[in-house]
């Protein structure tokens, strides 16, 4: 699940990239890496916010009315704040638990929060993407009256964007991309397999689909889950980060793909380069990645399953199972991690881990 990219800012840093397919071994390396925020903070989206002494950081995550945390540096200390949304649920939604939110500052300075919420007229557990606005990145945010993207619904109040790969399929994982011309786009995933990652242009306020815009399918995955798109423009190339495989196990991983366009099917034949796996990081299921960029730094934030404090969960974790009381796997949560990120042309390069205070 965000990924909000600040593409207009310069990127710096170094080190090497992990590529190719890597298998997960039966046990995980212990690894010295600790989360920068140990709380349950799944599918993070992180926004750098200019401050008197540089940048503060605000993060949003999956949860009721959207979880919020903030810090005065990327490494923390991160502290939880009040939920982002004022009311329990959007006027068009049937529930208040919001999945994989994203946070974006529009051209007029307004902060826009995107989230996926359930809708009763879609198939079971299917969602639509909504937006809420605030003058501050930490909120409180107030809902827009209609969702931004809700294909597949038969309710004319919410079915306002063309493009329905599957009847009754919802949409999740909103992520804003701003191109070099300053135009805002929303990336998202259709839920049912075969799932698609799609893109649609937003209006200048980034709260609605632009007049005349239609959504385009960038890539389709028929058998393996591909989700949480996050897009970066590098020269004439576009690099899309995504989460691959199932979120509920340590097999969840982060991949990246490259394309020279954003046209229909632009990433369909692109190689899925593996960036982070359980084996390469020593974590359990590193995924849900977001990129946060300032004029001097670029960092990748992501979640990993932790058990018993900040320790990575056992490699056989499956959160869909019920574990006996006392089993550390019964206490699994997704904590926030961060690494420095740089670029070799249009190739992402992983750097050092951020160390929590």
Image: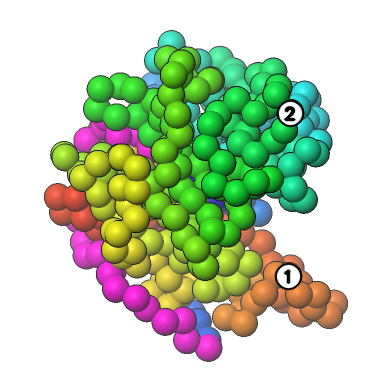
Camera-side residue: 88 or 272? 272
Residue at left offset 72%, top offset 33%:
154
Q: Mark 2 vs mark 1: give the one in front.
A: 2
**Does 254 sit left or right of 167 as displayed?**
left
Residue 20 among magenta residues: yes
- The residue shown at (21%, 55%) is 347
Q: The magenta stretch spans which residues?
A: 3-26
Residue 226 visible to an observer of this rendering: yes
Q: Which mark is residue 155?
A: 2
* Residue 237 sits above or below residue 130 on the image: below
Q: Nearer the viewer, residue 66 or 54?
A: 66
Give the residue drawn at x 57%, y 80%: 315
Binning the other alpha carbons within 10 Å of mark 1 as few (below 14), some (14 to 19) or many (20 upward) gives few
Query: What colour scheme governs how the chains and residues are painted in the rendered image of this protein?
Result: rainbow
Relative height, residue 204 to residue 67 (above, below): above
Magenta segment includes 45: no
Task: Tell me residue 106's x, y (percent).
Answer: 44, 19
**Could you say which quadrant of the image residue 53 lies in?**
top left
Return the residue at label 1: 320
Regarding mark 2 in the picture, which secondary structure is present there? loop
Question: Relative to 106, is 246 above or below?
Answer: below
Q: What is the x, y in percent for residue 94?
A: 81, 36
Packing grade of label 2 (10 A; few <14, some 14-19, many >=20) is: some
Please identify the dominant SS of the magenta region: loop
Residue 169 in the figure: left or right of residue 26:
right
- The residues bearing labels 2 and 1 have C-alpha atoms spaced at a distance of 32 Å
């Amino acid at each position: 699940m965000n990924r909000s990219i600040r593409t207009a800012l310069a990127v710096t840093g170094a080190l090497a990239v992990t590529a190719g397919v890597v298998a997960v071994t039966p046990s995980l390396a212990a690894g010295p890496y600790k989360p920068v925020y140990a709380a349950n903070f799944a599918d993070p989206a992180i926004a750098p916010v200019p401050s008197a002494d540089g940048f503060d950081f605000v993060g949003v995550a999956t949860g009721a009315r959207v979880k919020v945390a903030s810090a005065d540096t990327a490494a923390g200390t991160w502290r939880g704040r009040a939920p982002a949304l004022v009311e329990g649920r959007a006027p068009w939604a049937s529930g208040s638990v919001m999945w994989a939110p994203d946070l974006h500052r529009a051209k007029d300075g307004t902060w826009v929060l995107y989230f996926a919420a359930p809708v009763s007229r879609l198939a079971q557990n299917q969602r639509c993407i909504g937006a809420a606005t605030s003058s501050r990145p930490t909120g409180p945010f107030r809902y827009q009256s209609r969702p931004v993207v809700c294909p597949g619904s038969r309710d004319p109040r919410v079915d306002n964007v063309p493009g329905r790969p599957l009847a009754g399929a919802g949409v999740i994982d909103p992520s804003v991309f701003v191109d070099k011309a300053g135009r805002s786009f929303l990336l998202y995933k259709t839920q049912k397999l075969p799932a698609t990652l799609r893109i649609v242009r937003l209006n200048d306020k980034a709260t609605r689909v632009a007049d005349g815009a239609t959504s385009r399918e960038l890539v389709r995955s028929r058998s393996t889950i591909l989700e949480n798109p996050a897009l970066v423009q590098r020269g004439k190339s576009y690099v899309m980060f995504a989460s691959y495989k199932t979120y509920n196990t340590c097999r969840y991983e982060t991949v990246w793909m490259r394309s020279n366009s954003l046209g229909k099917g632009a990433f369909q034949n692109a190689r899925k380069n593996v960036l982070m796996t359980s084996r390469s990081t020593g974590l359990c299921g590193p995924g849900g990645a977001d990129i946060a960029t300032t004029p001097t730094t670029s960092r990748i934030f992501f979640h990993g399953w932790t058990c018993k404090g900040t320790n990575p969960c056992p490699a056989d974790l499956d959160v869909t199972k019920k574990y006996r009381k006392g089993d550390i796997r019964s206490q699994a949560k997704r904590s926030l991690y961060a690494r420095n990120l740089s670029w070799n042309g249009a190739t992402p390069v992983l750097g050092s881990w951020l160390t929590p205070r």
